[in-house]
Structure formats: structure tokens, C-alpha cells
Amino acid sequence: MRIVVALGGNALQERGAPMTVQNQRANVAKACAALAPIAQEHQLVISHGNGPQVGLLALQAAAYDHTSEYPFDVLGAQTEGMIGYMIEQELGNRLPFEKSIATILTMTEVDPADPAFTDPTKFVGPVYDADEARRLAVLWGWVVKPDGDQWRRVVPSPMPQRIFELSTIETLVAADTVVICAGGGGIPTMYQPGSRKLIGVDAVIDKDRASAVLARDLKADSLVIATDADAVYTGWGTPEQRAIMLVHPDTLAGFDFPAGSMGPKVEAAIDFALNTGRDAFIGSLTELPALLDGTAGTRVSVTANGVAYR
């Protein structure tokens, strides 16, 4: 099968943990241990988040001096190379020597009129308590919002339209190369109005939405959205919470999920299932084989009848 696996930020950086290279490499190694068996049996395309990493790079540049601040499209390109390098190395350590692996710097087109530019929602960087977040917001001109019981910086997250390197990715996948692409949702780019000049955009694209576009256009058999939750839950955090096992995308669309966390994952799974008629899965990366056979996580399928719980 052709499978697109979207790695959540937890695969690279555990929430609240020190953002060291050693920690990130250890987490990537864990992710690659789960991915390697899939890569040996199927055509595998890997996307990944970059929220903590791109936020850290922005902080580092701003701390140097204000003229050295880089826009988020450039920072996104930097994280694609850094994270792709780690995944290539750790996955290569677990695959036969002759197995090809390639990281593709990926540009994703967005609409300059996207309303997301006036309502930032994408979390980047480390977490803070409320007082520190508000202090930094005043100091740096940030927008900050609650993320669980803590606070983080948010930036615009426009909807992905298409991925420019699709034909290159297709060629590599067809040649049985494991491809790492669309990191952090891809590098946000757009055409200047009234021209064919492509420019970068100071934003961060949601990697789950971009992965759904990637999987759709690659004609993938399955989209897997790997996260730190073992499934999609209704009533999360309440005594009535229940894990969804199997659900029709139209039924899933009727539930309400947080915009900054599970919401984009659910929307991406719905879009892929409805646009392709193929299944999307949401769950823990450590349960990847069970996810794909429907015995773990949440399966979103047009063949489902309503919703079934575990």
C-alpha cells in the first residue's frame, strides 16, 4: 500500500521537556522504530510537525537582534532540513542499507485572502504560564492563547491549497524511496496578486491539513495521523469520555473538537476520507500496525455506519 504518516509534534519533542538535540533525537528514534517495519512492507511517505522547533528558532533569531529576525517561511525551511536529517538517519539505521530515503524541501501554496491571517491559531514554540506569556506578548508583539493549562504563542495558519513538489515526491515514491516531506505543513508560499511571482509567507501551515492534501494528491491508500492520544475521544476530560473506534466522516464532523489540537487532525481525516473514499486513522504511533488493521485508534471511513466506540 501507499501510506502517508503524519508525525505529531510529540514524536519529536515531548510537551514541556527541554528542547535539546538529544531529546529530539531520542524521540525521533522511537518514532522510526515504529515506522521501519511499515517502510519495509509498503510505500511510505512521512510528514511531521515543527511547532516547537520553529518557535525556538524564532526566539533565537529575535534574541540576537531585531534585524536578524527571520520570517516563518524561512524558519520552516530550516526545520524541514533539520528534522528530515534526523528522521533519515534514525530510520536508515533500522532499514536495509539499500533502502533509499530522501527529504524534500516542500513548498505549500496558500491563498493570500485566507481569513487565517487575521486570526492566528497555530501554536509555536515552548509553553509558558499565563503571566510570562503576557509579558512576552507585550515585549515581542506576539499573540498568545491558552494551550491546555498553559500558554503559547500563536501565528497565522492558512489552509494548504497544493504542494508544488508533488511530481518529484511521486517519482521518488514510485521508485520505492521513503520520502520525508511537507514538514511543518510545508513552507508557506503564495503568488503575488496579479503575477506569477512566488513568494514566502510569514505563517505556519497545519501539518495535518497539509498531509491530507499530500495524501489525496498522491492517491495514498491510507492517511495515518499519529498523535500522543491513543484515539479520538468524545467528551474528553469528562467522566463521559469515550474512545471512537470507527466513524463515518459525516458523523465525525458533527462533533466539536479543540481548534488548536485535535480539531485539525479530525478535519484532515474527514477531508481525506470524503475526497478519496479511503480510510484515515488517528492514534498512537506506537500502535501503528494495529492502527492500520483497525484494532487500535480511530478509523475514519466512508464505509462506517455512524459511530462505534471502544
Image (cartoon, rainbow, N blue to C red):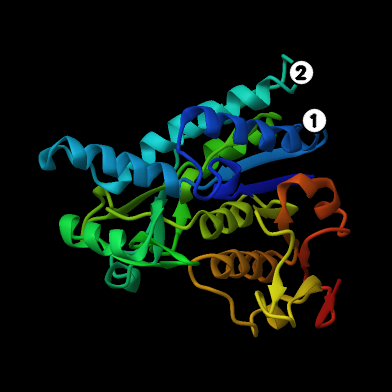
Give the residue at x 58% y 50%. 8
Q: Is residue 266 visible?
A: yes
| Residue 43 place in picture, x, y as percent | 73, 38
Residue 284 left/right relative to 51: right
| Residue 254 place in picture, x, y as percent | 65, 85
Q: Are marks 2 and 1 in contact (CB under 8 Å)?
A: yes
Choose top left, top right, bottom left or bottom right for residue 283.
bottom right
Q: CA distance from mark 2 to mark 1?
A: 9 Å
The one of 235 and 117 positioned closer to us in this rendering = 235
Q: Which residue is mark 2?
A: 96
Give the residue at x 37% y 61%. 129
Q: Is residue 103 visible?
A: no
Judged from the image, the secondary structure of the residue bearing numbered disc 1 is: helix
Choose top left, top right, bottom left or bottom right for residue 302.
bottom right
- Residue 279 is labelled as none
Crowding at mark 1 (Cα within 10 Å: few <14, some 14-19, many 20+): some
| Residue 248 place in picture, x, y as percent | 76, 77
Most extreme residue toward the top is 97
Give the residue at x 51% y 55%. 210
The amino acid beneath tag 2 is: Pro
Give the residue at x 80% y 83%. 306
Rendered view: 164 above or below 309: above
The one of 152 and 210 positioned closer to us in this rendering = 152
Rendered view: 185 above or below 115: above
Crowding at mark 2 (Cα within 10 Å: few <14, some 14-19, many 20+): few
Reading the chain from its start, which is encountered first: label 2 or label 1? 1
Judged from the image, the secondary structure of the residue bearing numbered disc 2 is: loop
Q: Which residue is mark 1?
A: 40
The one of 265 and 45 positioned closer to us in this rendering = 265
